[in-house]
Image: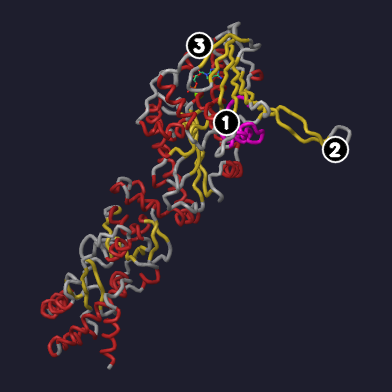
Amino acid sequence: MAKKQFKAESKRLLEMMINSIYTHREIFLRELISNASDAIDKIYYKALTDENLTFDKDSYYIKVAADKEKRILTISDSGIGMTKEELENNLGTIAKSGSFAFKNENELKDGHDIIGQFGVGFYSAFMVADNVAVTTKALGSDEAYKWESNGADGYTIKSCEKASVGTEITLTIKENTEDENFDEYLEEYRLKAIIKKYSDFIRYPIKMDVTERKLKEGTDNEWEEVQEEQTINSMVPIWRKNKNELTDEDYENFYKEKHYGFDKPLKHLHIKVDGAVRYNAILYIPENMPFDYYTKEYEKGLELYSSGVLIMDKCADLLPDYFSFVKGMVDSEDLSLNISREMLQHDRQLKVIAKNIKKKIKNELQSLLKNEREKYEKFYHSFGRQLKYGVYSDFGANKEELQDLLLFYSSKEKKLVSLEEYVSRMPEDQKYIYYASGDTHERIEKLPQTELVADKGYEILYFTEDIDEFAIKMLMKYNEKEFKSVSSGDLGIEAEENEKDASEEKENKELFEEMKNILSGKVKDVRVSKRLKNHPVCLASDGEVSIEMEKILQAMPDNQNIKADKILEINVNHEVFHSLKTSFENDKEKLALYTNLLYNQALLIEGLPVNDPVEFTNDICKIMV
Ligand code: ADP
Ligand code: MG
């Protein structure tokens, strides 16, 4: 009998299946089992409307059997079966509608995108088999047919014998190659594991003959191996159960079974939504940061199920980047397994689900912060940075969403505080939310720039992570209050000696001008400091880039040499100032020496390197002799 050719698109996909070096070949079993489950579903729905048909749950099942010698794997079901026409239409054309459109040739070449994303149904059998035969008898028909193909060169359909309604798929498993092991698809333990992994929650029993070691009857030390039919899948997914049936331990076990993480989850969320889009989800907030979390190897995403069938391992679209630490799964009956035309539709429904999930995670974190502070701080320790990245990225699009989840160390409370807590404590005359940046809390504490603000009794937030200041610059305000670095030009604090400062500024205009010249472009200006109390000197920044930001930008691989506009501030109440004045009048060489020394000291206090360490130490020696 002449072989029939596959339709053009099917042929291309088939070739891709056969030739792809694809690491997830094992999904073929998921695809065939899900088809079998669909076929049983069809009888189930028919029975709902057809009086002559009853659905006796016990007689519906899927069976997987392997014959190692013959290299044959069969997947049979008692589902609705196919007529000759259906065989022709369903298995001769990919995805029925034939509208499967490849985005481009490259995608076709490696195929990863397509196979990885949504599975490709029946044809995936060719990833592991040289020959595929489908024997089937449709419900209400007396005739059975056999479809057979060994790949891209076409298929045949002929009449055959089959006792009961349903379908049996026979795969002749490929021989091992140098690089790939196909024998594993004939191994009992491997098949069991694949079924467990992908199809555990299929609603019908998936049966297999399993070898068990048992005590021989009548003996107490003689063992024998017996074959026993077992149901491999558990059939009831944990996410379909009621929350009150489940304990924390159940959720924890699920977390481990799924390998979501090696730690214990900090918190779980069990979501059931029955709205425009229906879905169930179990989400986890892990306690510890995965070791690769802040690397580009880390992949965010949730497992995606469609009616209990796993269709995607890591669906990235379900999570925004700033919640990329969340683990778990989503199951929706509104998503179909079909990869083809529903692709776009999926997207729309997925978006609704993703939006919903985002809201739930945020609420959960907020309530954790409110009610279980210690836990929240633990969480924040691991993932706070990611939230700050979230505030900063996408040009601040999500800043409002995230601002209440941020915590910073407080100079007054000596612990992490939220912005809300900070603002609620602000004295009436305090205009800004103050912060100071530095490597550690201890170093920030000693920064001369913090003196005035701290003296005023205002609280200061300590920024020790490189992202902090960038995130806050993006946020700009919280609750109408602007953020202000203690090093910025105008602190918004009315200094008592304002007039005195102004006159000092005028009086010493020439001195400051001279000092600025000595520093030849290293600072934008030399000024009277309003913030210094005990220290003689400090650096302040004027403009968008702070000194702390300069440090971070300079350390980046694509360093574009962005620098802060630095102001050298002089404490006119400090004794050193008199020396400056005297030397300005009598000894210009000394003024240059002092100016350079002060500037270098200011750099050191900021944690910046001095320009020329040798010159600096020479300068110190000069004043010693
Ligand atoms: P999809 O399941 O997304 O429709 P598949 O390639 O997996 O795509 O299957 C193609 C079609 O073949 C199915 O829609 C179904 O009509 C038919 N089919 C496949 N396997 C079976 C089966 N075990 N019993 C009945 N029909 C089946
Ligand atoms: Mg299918």
Q: Nearer the viewer, mark 3 or mark 1?
A: 3
Question: Going by the picture, which residue comes out furthest to the right?
Answer: 218
The part of the chain drawn in magenta is: 181-206
Mark 3 = which residue?
Answer: 2
Q: Is residue 427 visible?
A: no
Q: From the Cβ of disc 1, is ligand 2 less than 8 Å away?
A: no
- Most common SS among magenta residues: helix
Q: What number is the disc on residue 199?
A: 1
Q: Nearer the viewer, mark 2 or mark 3?
A: 3
Tell me which corner region of the image, top left, top right, bottom left or bottom right, holds residue 257.
Answer: top right
Q: Amino acid at mark 3?
A: Ala
Q: CA distance from mark 2 to mark 1?
A: 35 Å
Q: Amino acid at mark 1?
A: Ser
- Residue 464, position as x, y percentages in the image: 37, 63
Q: Which of disc 1 and disc 2 is earlier in sequence?
A: 1
- Residue 225, position as x, y percentages in the image: 78, 33
Q: Amino acid at mark 2?
A: Glu
Q: CA distance from mark 2 to mark 3?
A: 57 Å
Tell me which corner region of the image, top left, top right, bottom left or bottom right, holds residue 10.
Answer: top left
Q: Secondary structure at mark 1?
A: helix
Q: Which of disc 1 and disc 3 is earlier in sequence?
A: 3
Q: Residue at x 58, y 33 (%)?
A: 237
Q: What number is the disc on residue 222?
A: 2
Task: For label 2, count other residues whose C-alpha is less than 10 Å away and answer few (under 14), some (14-19) or many (20+).
Answer: few
